[in-house]
Image: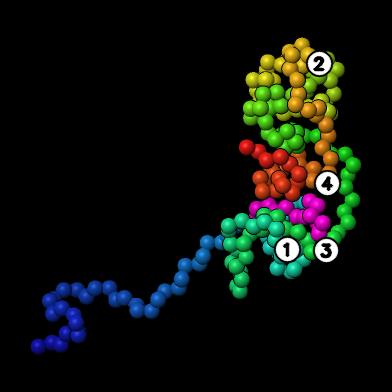
Amino acid sequence: MPLTALGSSSASGPPGPRRDPRPGPAAPAAPVATTAACLLLNATYEPLCVVSSRRAIVLVLAAKAEPVDVSEVLCHAELVALPVPVVIRLTRYVRVPYPAQVPLSRRAVFTRDGSTCVYCGAAATSIDHVWPRSRGGTHTWDNVVAACRRCNHTKADRSLAELGWSLPQPPRAPSGSAWRLLGHRAVDPRWRTWLGLPDVA
């Protein structure tokens, strides 16, 4: 009588696939995206610029900066797991020259006005010239505001006095180094406190 393997069935039939008891290689962990943006503050907490999350992590690991606000995402290195920074502060003060004029742009106007229509408080979808350009109005900070489509269409080329409208406050050019960051990128809501911007509801 032929011998059978211990614990195997003596029933005839083709042998099943052989299983290797050794564990296979573990699947690599999904990489953490580190290309998001991080606000860089001077040692005095003055906003300087926006850097990538990867650059922010390098600065923190090199002890050239410290995290001020972090996200819930962890970046895993060989020996450390570091929360991805949202705001970091330099450990040493750096002097940076700033341009005197803040560039005027649609995005910067939206940020200044909290992305809300200055006439009715609805969500802003366009910009409006308080004194219409067709009547000599200038494309300057003190004459440009954020507006919704309805108010912009209703106002058309009329003045506020003709409509009986008023502004909550006169529009003006923003001041401060934080505004160098605006006009060309979206603002993370977690940066607004450091940029001196109003919270958006």
Per the image, the residue denoted by label 2 is 134
Of badges 2 and 1, the one in the foreground is: 1
Mark carried by residue 177: 4
* Residue holding disc 1: 66
Query: Image point 19% across, 82% down: which residue?
Result: 7
Q: Which residue is mark 3?
A: 92
Q: Secondary structure at mark 2?
A: helix
Q: Counting residues from the N terminus, which is met first, the one under dot 2 or under dot 4?
A: 2
Sequence-wise, the earlier of marks 4 and 1 is 1
Nearer the observer: mark 2 or 4; the answer is: 4
Looking at the rendered structure, the secondary structure element under dot 4 is: helix
Q: Colour mode?
A: rainbow
Residue placed at 70% from the left, 35% from the top?
114
Q: Is residue 162 magenta?
A: no
Q: Spatial distance from mark 2 to mark 3, Cα to Cα?
A: 51 Å
Q: Nearer the viewer, residue 188 or 185?
A: 188
Alpha carbons under labels 2 and 4: distance apart: 33 Å
Q: Earlier in the sequence, mark 1 or mark 3?
A: 1
Other residues around mark 4 within 10 Å, as few (<14) / some (14–19) / many (≥20)? some
Q: Which residues are magenta?
A: 34-47
| Label 1 crowd (10 A; few <14 / some 14-19 / many >=20) | many
Q: Is residue 36 magenta?
A: yes
Q: Foreground mark, 2 or 3?
A: 3
* Residue 186 position (above or below residue 83): above
